[in-house]
Structure formats: structure tokens, C-alpha cells
Image (tube, grey):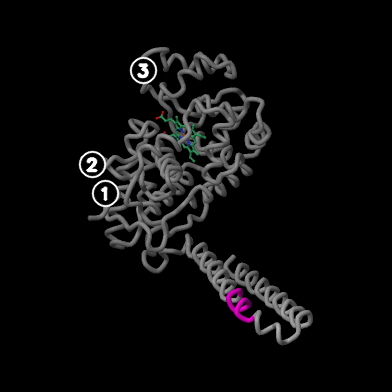
């Protein structure tokens, strides 16, 4: 990619130079040498403007190239991938749902001002963060898992690895440990020094979203409708609370009646808000394509889930993923890489937090 961009730039520069040469010859031919003197200051200022423009373009290119890379810590913390993976393996072995909880934590981090570990910051007397925003309060979980990984990483490589990168690696490892795809995690994110509760309230899609709202909220993060449908397959693992799917199982028509009746037993029409149900009844802790099979059978748990298969634009893709687990796995991995690249802090921006819950002193 780097080489391609440089070659592309130099071809463009050569083409630019020859066009400029032709223009100069044309001017001399048209005006004669004496009139050229008058044009020299103009030409000079045009040249310096062009130079400034070219340097700005080159600077922009190198800023983009200086972003994330999977080998970012290969010299400074070579043991990082093993530390994250082995801690996640212990955690998921004890509680398989944690793979789901960490994956969701990463999604909720990336969708609120980029993948910058802002979700991990605790509220203080003077600081209001994202943990208590509506989509996260009494719902997002796994913070202590990230703490445990961070302290293991700090012991091996002090003050080197960001909490944002740890979360990105842990989310990938959780998925692959419960049977999902693997992908290369790009690294080099830095940690935010601030967080926004109001952005967490407004940027994360809710369970009563319509298809067009879902598409719009992912588009706002540079992700396509296809990415959205693939990423929603994360709901093949994990649990949801009754308050988040009550209206779907009591009020919606696009639901298998037997499935609705079964779910109502665990989720009364009033009370029991926190009662949990697995997204996928058959393989609740296995990362497979049954989420899409459920949608085709009108057994989506959230209103927003069933919106992906309700005579709309995503029906065809849902059907494809429901019969082709490999296609889903491939698209999910690619979409996770794109989600993980949302507005990272790099270079001198942000910091490497020492404790993922607080900004450095
Ligand atoms: C498309 C829009 C989405 C909506 C409306 C949505 C909404 C929700 C809701 C309401 C819950 C249940 C929370 C609770 O009851 O405590 C949930 C759980 C979950 N979500 Fe999503 N979600 C969306 C997309 C995603 C994406 C893109 C991912 C990851 C790539 C994801 C991963 C998860 C996981 C793994 C869980 C289970 C967490 C656990 O068991 O702790 N979701 N989601």
C-alpha cells in the first residue's frame, strides 16, 4: 500500500511537470520574450503555491500512512499478543459469555469518538464519562477483564501499550476463542484523555431502531449497510435483558409466535427488566451463523435484529449468511477491521494510560 501510494504520487508528479513545461513553451510562443519578464513574478508565486500544495498533500499522505499497523509493538512488546490471548483464554474458559461482553465493549468504544478506550474511564467527582450512559449502564461489562490484561501487559512492557489496543486485541481473541473468525488487528491506537456521556447516548444505535436508523448510524461512522449486517452477527453470542426486547416479543408482528411465547415466559410484560435471554437459543456461546438462521425463522431477539430481515434491503444478505457461514465469517472479520480503524488517536495525540480507568496525572 505504502509503495503503491508513493509510485502513484511520483507518476502524478512527472505528469504534472510535463504539463507545466508545455504551458511555459506555449506562453513564450504566444507573448514573446519581453512580455515574459512581466509574467515572472506571477509564475514565481504560482510555483510557490504549487509547492506548498504538493507538500500539504505529501504531509497528509504520510499522516494517513503513519496510522495503525499490526506490527506496531513487535519490537517494544513482542509478548503482547500472547499475554492478551492467554488471559482471554482463562476468562472465557471460566465464563464463555465474556467473549460477547468484551466484543460489545469494543463496539461501544469505537462508535463513540473512535476506538480510544474512552468507554473505560470511570466517572469522578469532576468527570462524567461513558460508563453510565444509557446503552452502557447496568449493561456493558468486562471492565475488570481489561484491567487484568492491562496489569499483565504493564508487568511485561511498562508504559508501552494503550488500553485501546488491548481492547481491540481482546475482542478479536474472544471471538476466535468461541469459534469465530480470526483477523489481523492493526495497532498503534492511543488512549483518550476525555470521554463523552452525551455522545455515547446519541451515537450508539438502540434496540428499537428501524433499518434506516441502523444504516444511518453505521454510515455516520463510515461503515456500509453490508458492514452493519455483518457486524450485527455478533448477536450470535451473548445475552440481552428483558427491558431491551420486551416490546418486540409483546407488540411486534414480525416474530414467530412460538418463539415469542417462549420468550414471554422469561420476560413478563411488567417487571423482570433485568432478566436475561440468550440471543441464540441453540448455540448461545458459539460464534457461528445461527443469528442469520434465526432471523430467517423470525426469531430475532431485538426489534433491531429482526429489522435486518423484514422485507428490506438486507434480506438477501441475511439469507446468504444464513446458508454460508464462511461468507459471514469473512465479512465479519473485514468489517471488524474497519470498525477498529474508526478515528484512532495516533502519533502525539492522546496518551498511553497507565490504568485504563483513569487519565494519567
Ligand atoms: C446494529 C445495532 C446494534 C444494536 C441496536 C445493539 C443492541 C444491543 C443490545 C440492546 C444488547 C443487549 C444489552 C443488554 O440487554 O444489556 C446488545 C448486546 C450485545 N451486542 Fe449489540 N447492538 C448492535 C450492534 C452490535 C455490534 C456491531 C456488535 C459487535 C460487533 C454487538 C455486540 C453485542 C454483543 C456481543 C452483545 C451481548 C453482550 C453480553 O452478553 O454481555 N452489537 N446489543
Q: How crowded is mark 1: few (under 14 residues within 10 Å), some or many (20 or more)?
A: some
> What is the x, y in percent for residue 285?
46, 35
Give me the residue at 46% from left, 22% from top.
Answer: 245
Picture coordinates of residue 102, whole percent (x, y):
40, 42
Confirm or deny contact between disc 1 and disc 3 (CB under 8 A).
no
Q: Residue at x 42, y 43 (%)?
A: 112
Q: State whether residue 165 is above or below residue 144.
A: below
Q: Residue 272 carries which label?
A: 3
Q: Residue 16 at what x, y percent from top left? A: 68, 73
Tell me the SS state at disc 3.
Answer: loop
Q: Give the range drawn in magenta.
A: 40-46
The image quadrant where one finds the N terminus is bottom right
At x 37% / y 63%, what residue is drawn?
A: 348
Along the polypeptide, which appears first: circle 2 or circle 1?
2
Residue 39 is one of the magenta-drawn residues: no
Report the residue marked by disc 1.
358
Q: Is mark 2 within 8 Å of ligand 1?
A: no
First in residue order: circle 3 vs circle 2: 2
Magenta region includes residue 45: yes
Nearer to us of marks 3 and 2 is 2
Q: Residue furthest left?
A: 125
Element assignment for label 1: loop
Q: Which of 361 and 48 is in front in this view?
A: 48
Whether label 1 lies within 8 Å of ligand 1 gets the answer no
Amino acid at each position: 500500500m505504502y509503495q503503491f501510494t508513493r509510485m502513484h504520487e511520483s507518476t502524478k508528479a512527472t505528469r504534472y511537470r510535463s504539463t507545466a513545461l508545455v504551458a511555459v513553451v506555449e506562453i513564450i510562443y504566444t507573448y514573446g520574450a519581453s512580455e515574459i519578464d512581466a509574467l515572472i513574478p506571477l509564475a514565481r508565486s504560482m510555483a510557490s503555491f504549487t509547492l506548498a500544495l504538493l507538500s500539504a498533500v505529501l504531509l497528509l499522505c504520510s499522516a494517513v500512512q503513519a496510522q495503525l499497523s499490526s506490527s506496531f509493538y513487535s519490537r517494544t512488546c513482542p509478548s503482547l499478543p500472547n499475554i492478551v490471548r492467554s488471559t482471554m483464554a482463562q476468562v472465557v474458559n471460566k465464563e464463555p459469555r465474556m467473549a460477547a461482553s468484551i466484543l460489545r465493549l469494543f463496539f461501544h468504544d469505537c462508535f463513540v469518538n473512535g476506538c480510544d478506550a474512552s468507554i473505560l474511564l470511570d466517572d469522578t467527582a469532576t468527570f462524567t464519562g461513558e460508563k453510565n450512559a444509557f446503552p452502557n449502564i447496568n449493561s456493558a461489562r468486562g471492565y475488570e477483564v481489561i484491567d487484568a490484561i492491562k496489569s499483565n501487559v504493564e508487568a511485561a512492557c511498562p508504559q508501552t501499550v494503550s488500553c485501546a489496543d488491548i481492547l481491540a486485541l481482546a475482542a478479536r481473541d474472544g471471538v476466535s476463542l468461541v469459534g469465530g473468525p480470526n483477523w489481523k488487528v492493526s495497532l498503534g491506537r492511543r488512549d483518550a484523555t476525555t470521554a463523552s456521556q452525551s455522545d455515547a447516548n446519541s451515537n450508539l444505535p438502540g434496540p428499537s431502531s428501524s433499518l434506516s436508523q441502523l444504516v444511518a448510524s453505521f454510515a455516520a461512522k463510515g461503515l456500509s449497510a453490508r458492514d452493519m449486517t455483518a457486524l450485527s452477527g455478533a448477536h450470535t453470542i451473548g445475552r440481552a435483558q428483558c427491558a431491551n426486547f420486551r416490546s418486540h416479543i409483546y407488540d411486534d408482528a414480525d416474530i414467530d409466535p412460538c418463539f415469542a411465547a417462549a420468550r414471554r415466559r422469561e420476560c413478563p410484560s411488567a417487571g423482570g427488566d433485568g432478566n436475561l435471554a440468550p440471543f441464540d437459543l441453540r448455540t448461545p456461546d458459539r460464534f457461528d451463523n445461527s443469528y442469520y438462521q434465526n432471523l430467517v425463522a423470525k426469531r430475532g431477539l431485538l426489534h433491531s435484529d429482526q429489522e435486518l430481515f423484514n422485507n428490506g434491503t438486507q434480506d438477501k444478505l441475511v439469507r446468504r449468511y444464513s446458508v454460508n457461514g464462511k461468507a459471514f465469517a469473512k465479512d465479519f472479520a473485514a468489517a471488524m477491521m474497519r470498525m477498529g480503524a474508526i478515528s484512532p488517536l495516533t502519533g502525539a495525540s492522546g496518551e498511553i494510560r497507565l490504568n485504563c480507568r483513569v487519565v494519567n496525572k
